[in-house]
Image: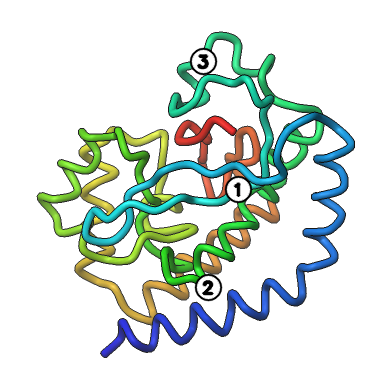
Amino acid sequence: MYKYIKRIIDIILSLSGLIILSPVFLIIIIAIKLDSKGPIFFKQKRVGIHKSHFHILKFRTMCIDTPKDIPTHLLENPDQWITSVGKFLRRTSLDELPQIINIFKGEMSIVGPRPALWNQYDLIKERDKYGANDVPVGLTGWAQINGRDELEIDVKAKLDGEYAKKIGLVMDVKCFFVTIFSVLRGEGVVEGGIGAKVKRTDKNY
């Protein structure tokens, strides 16, 4: 039953977010276009519920010739690829805003395990052990507020599994508000990560 309630909440909040934040979207779009050549949005293949694939949306923060499908931390001198506007967007987590569109479309939820890159086979396999691939992926989640990229893959998958077991309104509300407070405080955020103790190693644009 909760999955239907969760979806209704996602639709209401994502639609409200798109309307309320439309001026912010416009300002960011103009800033990106003035700062560097290339598209406004960055699309990247990710793994959704039941290991389905979809394209996650983010505001582009890196140069268009950045190697694709390679996490930022694996690039040689990552800073050389990040645009001036991109550094600000990552630091403030504003690059994540277009995922509201993914949520509205039903490809993501507000709260859930962060969608793995299509080629993060080790993480996908570990999540299978705990049933974490069978719940909607999210903008933020239980693993994000408990360490995310500072965690080993098996620990991260286990936390995602805990979320899958305890999924419900109380768990979602807790993850949502802890994330908001963490972002507002800039707590443990590196390169604009969302949530606490985030290193942003799952992206490149």
Residue at figure coordinates x 80%, y 35% from the top left:
85
- Observer-side mark, 2 or 3, equals 2
Please, what secondary structure does the residue beneath circle 1 have?
Answer: strand
On screen, residue 23 versus residue 9, left or right, reads right
Q: In this figure, which residue is indicated by the disc labeled 2?
A: 104
Do callouts 1 and 3 mark residues in contact (Cβ within 8 Å)? no
- In which quarter of the view is residue 135 placed? bottom left
Please, what secondary structure does the residue beneath circle 2 have?
Answer: helix
**Colouring scheme, one of rainbow, by chain, secondary structure, one colour:** rainbow
Q: In this figure, which residue is indicated by the disc labeled 1?
A: 58
Q: For label 2, count other residues whose C-alpha is less than 10 Å away and answer few (under 14), some (14-19) or many (20+).
A: many
Which quadrant of the figure contains the N terminus?
A: bottom left
Direction left: furthest residue: 129
Residue 23 drawn at (x, y percent): 85, 65
On screen, residue 168 versus residue 141, left or right, reads left
Do callouts 1 and 2 mark residues in contact (Cβ within 8 Å)? no
Q: Nearer the viewer, residue 24 or 40?
A: 40
Task: Work out how far the residue at label 2 is from the one at label 3, CA to CA, in angstroms.
Answer: 32 Å
Residue 17 drawn at (x, y percent): 67, 73
Residue at figure coordinates x 80%, y 50% from the top left:
29
Please, what secondary structure does the residue beneath circle 3 have?
Answer: loop
From this view, report whether residue 113 is shown above or below residue 202.
below
Q: Nearer the viewer, residue 179 or 140?
A: 140
Label 2 vs 3, first from the N-terminus: 3
Q: For label 3, count other residues whose C-alpha is less than 10 Å away and answer few (under 14), some (14-19) or many (20+).
A: some
On screen, residue 16 versus residue 126, left or right, reads right
From this view, report whether residue 22 is shown above or below residue 82.
below
Q: In this figure, which residue is indicated by the disc labeled 3?
A: 75
Residue at figure coordinates x 81%, y 50% from the top left:
28
Residue at figure coordinates x 34%, y 87% from the top left:
4
